[in-house]
Amino acid sequence: MPKPQRRPEEIKAVRENILTHAVRLMTEEGYHNFSMRKLAKPLGIAAKTIYNYFRNKDELYLAILTKGFADLYDCCFRAYKSSPSPLGRMDAMLEAFLSFGLDQANVYNLMFTWHVPKYNDYVGTPMEPTARLELETALRAPELFVQAIKGCVDGPDPLSDRDARFIMIRLWTHLHGFIAGYNNTLLDYMHEDPLSLRPIILERIKGSLRRELNGHQPEKLQLING
């Protein structure tokens, strides 16, 4: 007698369990040393069972990134909707980004490290459509930041998309520097309690954003546009 088909929610639960264990194993082993065979052991199943849910290692890896970037966007979007004030939204979004990076360290490190495959590595391969979906998902959060930054400047001289994008990149690189330094324990060698720096880092970033937006004049943006 054939086994009854699993319900969609059951399939989703199994996939999420596989992804959770895969993130942990990739963090420990590194992407290049990761294998479906190694993943099967902590899951307590045969490696071939994993292939019922993911075609190969790359599809599994891209599913991790797609879910991670979707979760990051959701965190930032909830922060965006949490305040009627444009600057209040920015404050909440900066805090949401930082919290995600520190609280979801394993998946964040996979999402933002350079020594793992990126979209261009899949162009021209069968995995290109899956990688394109991952890239499109990854770009949603920065686009939300650009939208929120532009919303902070009103009047006859609004921020251009290019200027807002530059500010977004500056904010993200500042946040990422702290997150990466904390996650890889480098800051432990520089400070006795690096996590205590979190509110100070945030306040400095928020302050620099306000000064930049308050000083928004065409002549003061020449370095950005140049």
Image (cartoon, rainbow, N blue to C red):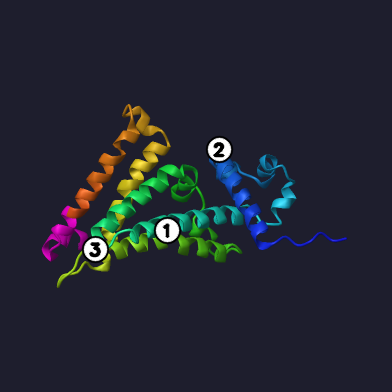
Q: Name the residue that disc number 3 marks.
A: 163
Rendered image: mark on residue 28: 2
Magenta region, mostly helix, strand or loop? Answer: helix
Image quadrant for the C terminus? Answer: bottom left
Q: Amino acid at mark 2?
A: Glu
Residue depicted at x 69% and y 51%: 50
Residue depicted at x 56% and y 45%: 23
Choose top left, top right, bottom left or bottom right for residue 37.
Answer: top right
Range shown magenta: 211-226
Residue depicted at x 14% and y 58%: 214
Between disc 1 and disc 2, whose residue precedes? Answer: 2
Q: Position of residue 122 (x, y in %)?
A: 54, 60
Between disc 3 and disc 2, whose residue precedes? Answer: 2
Q: Position of residue 137 (x, y in %)?
A: 47, 62
- Residue 223: in magenta span: yes
- Mark 3 and mark 1 in contact? Answer it, CB < 8 Å: no
**Neighbours of disc 2 within 10 Å: few (<14), some (14-19), many (20+):** few
Residue 55 seen anywhere in this rendered image of the structure: no
Is the residue 22 above or below the residue 169 in the image?
above
Numbered label tally: 3
Q: Name the residue that disc number 1 marks.
A: 73
Q: CA distance from mark 1 to mark 2?
A: 26 Å
Closer to the eye: label 1 or 2? 1
Q: Amino acid at mark 1?
A: Tyr
Report the side of 38 relative to 130 (left or right): right
Q: Amino acid at mark 3?
A: Asp
